[in-house]
Image (cartoon, rainbow, N blue to C red):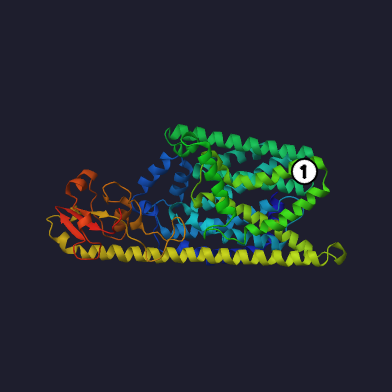
Amino acid sequence: MRKSFRRHLGQHALSFVIMAVACVLIQGRLLLQPSVGIDTEVMLYNKELQYIAWQSIGRQGLVLLSRLFQPGSFSLMRAGVLTLVFLVLAVILWTYVFSEEGEDASRLQVLVSSLVLVCSPLLTEQFYFRLQAAEVALTMSLVALSLLCLRAFRDENNVVALCVSVLLLAFSVSVYQSFVALFLTGAAIQYVQLVFAGADKQRRKRALLSSCAVFVAGYLLCFAATRLLSPDGMYAAGEIFWQSRSFAENLTDILRSYAYVYGARNMDFTPAIPLTAVPVILFAVRFLRREKSAKRPLLAGLAALLLIAPFAVHLFVGGSLPARARFPVSFLYAFLAFLATRLMEVFFHAEKKDGGMGRMLCAYLTALVLFGGIVHSGYVSFYLGRTDLTRYRGDVDFAQTLWQETAVLRSELQDPAAVTYAFYGAHAAETEAVSEVIGKSIFGWDAEEESGWRSAPRIRYLFAYLGMPYAAPDAAQIKENAPDASAMPVFPEAGSIIRRENLIFVKLSEKK
């Protein structure tokens, strides 16, 4: 396998260089700019607080990697550079997973599928969380290595490789629970490649059983480690809706998630990319017609598995998940693009007697869809990065304005360091939110408490990071001193800021 991988690197070196350049251009704005988003402000304020939170939701692997990559204070630049490096590595490994069966992949196949990955808006949404971006990017590589070790066991009966595959999967799930879905997606991809390579029934059976064994053993090992290290840290336990909602509600949410992703109904998703499945489906239909009827149920079930695998976590919890947790779909799209590119190449080289104008038309349409999908995905991801930078600059300007506007009130206190702030409502960013998290101001989160007045930790941590620290009041202190918000105008109008003892109350909006 090592010789095969070295050959893969050598044959596709130019494709990987182009992919790396695209990765920096598309994702660099988000990962290298000095931007602080939600959750990252906690890491910058006090890493141990974030580690405790991760430990409490069963992410021991994430804590371990974070301590390794960020031994001192958390560095945004270090996190961004590491993420880019690990993302390039992950894409290289995953293109090898795509092409590990049958004939060697062409340079165009590798280039197209790698660009689909680095341009993915779903990955951009995930990497917005800079505090864990490098760790998630590295773990994408670990899942690919787990799949390659699984293949080594299948092909060479290497028991050591099987054990390593289990350990890598268990660790990956302890970093982020959605890696369960990524492993299943990769296993389904490997099985598809086996079928297309003409593997016999015995080999397919061995592949299926070994994949199931690794998945079960890896998940149970992670579950046991979580129970041991953090008895109350099963993140999914509080998120399993099958226990609290009706079957119809859960099924509706799951189907809505499918429609949301495969129907490309949001700017986070690229309409052209799912269309790469069209030539693959047409080829599969023709393939089924030529195969024996006994194989048709197998192949139909395989296609269903490929579409379901990225949503394994959705099925487990019984509801929809945030866009950042759906990043395994990007790997499925990349594989579909890999297959579609191969079909396009076959059609372009077909003789007239083997299809003629129809095949050429299909080839040109496939090329158009692939090119349009990559360009649009890249634009969306680049736009998301630009939006986040605009949002962050607006947050910084707004925080500094608040600090300056309340300077006189702070100076009236005997101990200005004891001052604290409470806010009513939320502040909207200069740019509209263009995804579930990107584009939304830090002053727009945590605004759902009944009283409306709150001292949101996110805002306080951002102020501290900007060199404007203030104390944290308790809820009782705020409630006891809170003015009538309905009688106050909205900041920056006169009367929108009121001081009561060491508490400064600021009304940000009319809504809570």
Residue 17: image location, x then y, percent: 62, 65
On the image, which quarter does residue 393 sit in? bottom left
Q: Left or right? Give the position of 501 relative to 424.
A: left
Is 214 in front, or is 249? Answer: 249
Is 465 situated left or right of 99 in this image? left
Question: Relative to 130, does residue 211 appear above or below in the rendering?
Answer: above
Q: Is residue 69 visible?
A: yes
User: How many numbered dots are placed on residues in this image?
Assistant: 1
Give the percent coordinates (x, y) of residue 60.
46, 41
Q: Amino acid at mark 1?
A: Arg
266 and 505: which is toward the camera: 266
Q: Residue at x 50, y 52 (%)?
A: 323
Percent x, y of residue 158: 69, 38
- Mark 1: which secondary structure? helix
Return the x and y of residue 126 as percentages of the image width and height.
49, 54
Q: Residue at position x 55%, y 53% from top?
A: 260
- Report crowding for label 1: few under 14, some 14 to 19, many 20 or more residues within 10 A (C-alpha): some
Please say if 333 is above or below 308. below
Q: Residue at x 24, y 62 (%)?
A: 403
In the image, residue 394 above or below residue 7: below
Per the image, the residue denoted by label 1 is: 296
The answer to whether residue 7 is seen in the rendering is no
Q: Which residue is farthest front? A: 248
Seen in the picture, residue 232 relative to 390 is either above or below; the reply is: above
